[in-house]
Image (cartoon, grey):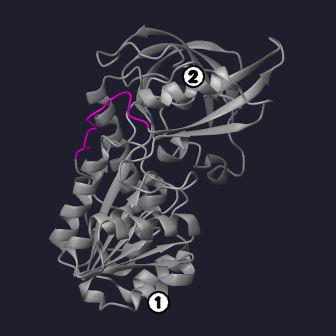
Amino acid sequence: MGQDVHGTAGSDPAAQDGGFAPEPPLARGDRLAARVTDVAFGGEGVARVNEFVVFVPFVLPGELVELEVTEVKRHFARARLVRVLEGSAERVTPRCPYFGGCGGCQYQHVAYREQLRLKHRQVSDLMERVGGFPAAAVQPVVPSPAEYGYRNRLLVRSQWHKPEQRLAIGFLRHDSRLVVDVEECAIAEPLLNRQLARVRAQPPPRGGLKVALRIQPEGWAVPPDSFFQNNFFALPSLLEVVRAALRDGGARHLVDVYCGVGYFGIELAREVESFVGLEYDRQALAAARQNAAARGLSNGEFVAGTAEECLAGALGKFRADRMAVILDPPRVGCAASALDQFRAVRPRQILYISCHPATQARDLRALCGEGLYRLHRLTPVDMFPQTQHVECVADLRAGVPCGGANG
């Protein structure tokens, strides 16, 4: 991830040098001091040794650190942090005793204001280099009201720890598939930590099993395996960004693709004359209908099936110049066939929501090709403090040449 963002591991100097690349200047086990120049999307710091890139976690830009090389590739290496020789003013003490081992958080050592700046810079960089969009289109990151104690869902893993002859219950390490034994998670809501304590008191019968812990959102039906945003504290901010963009866009009908339990379509139902939600998860779809009925909504419907199967019918329900689309796809992004349908129909507005700005930038570039859409603005919302992740809302408008790729 980080190497692609900075164009290091993703490039291939050997292809420009007769197929031969210089020998890496480092070897596994080497210890050295290096200055960190940046933090890449994904949370790894970027240092250079004779212009050879080294990725190291848990550091900050400007820091001088001692590192130990753990992996060497042709065009980059990875290392572990041994100690900080010259620390940044933005470095803080992590709250969690498992930080640095557990792979759940990447930024607990970073002051929260700096986390927001890092994420803004990372998103802007991705939008420029992957999407071809101007950095000025990226708005400041909307902060989370809760910096810790916000997660409402955890996936707890169990693993037999053979050397100690005991069951480890917790989360994967940041550098392996081994499980870190965790008694309490600093970014989880207190109720989840009480659930975790019960799991530890009555552990799974063997290693290799996973236990999903969840706090149900008040007033929403959500099946156990269906998606819902994991930060109740920041969710109103995310909704307000989407609502404001929809109002500004002026559409009168809404198609909510990948609608899950219907959150966005239902919350925005009174902003439009009618809406339709598409979802392949039948349990989530049943919950969406239940959620709409509980609010007395009669101007919407929910259709079962994949986006690729149902999109043509849904887009055909409304005039393109009066229609907005909400896209909240999985991390892998949208299927190319779905993007082609949007380009062919050209709804008035597309609001693309994603927690993976790299795939989002790729899809936005495809949508904006030949000037069919322009990126009006992109607003990051920090749904995941202390971690590498950030939710982004892209507001695309049809009819004006795009400021991004091929625009």
Mark 2 Cα-neighbour bin, 10 Å: few <14, some 14–19, many ≥20: some
Q: In the image, what residue occupies the spot 67% across and 33% down?
A: 157
SS class, disc 1: helix
Range drawn in magenta = 140-151
Looking at the rendered structure, the number of numbered marks drawn on it comes to 2
Q: Is residue 280 left or right of residue 246?
A: right
**Viewer-proximal residue, 34 or 216?**
216
Mark linked to residue 313: 1
In the depicted structure, whether residue 273 falls above or below residue 208:
below
Residue 137 seen in the current view? no
Residue 397 in sight in this render: yes
Residue type at mark 2: give it. Ala
Instruction: Report x, y in % for residue 381.
Output: 31, 47
Q: Mark 2 = which residue?
A: 197
- Which quadrant, please, contains the C terminus? bottom left
> Which structural element holds mark 2?
helix
Residue 239 placement, left or right of 35: left
Residue 368: image location, x then y, percent: 36, 74
Please indicate whether residue 211 sits to the left or right of residue 93 in the image.
right
Give the amino acid at mark 1.
Answer: Gly
Was residue 373 drawn as part of the magenta stretch in this picture?
Answer: no
Residue 400 in picture, x, y percent from top left: 23, 79
Residue 190 in the image: state x and y as whole percent: 42, 26
What residue is drawn where x is 56% and y is 75%? Answer: 306
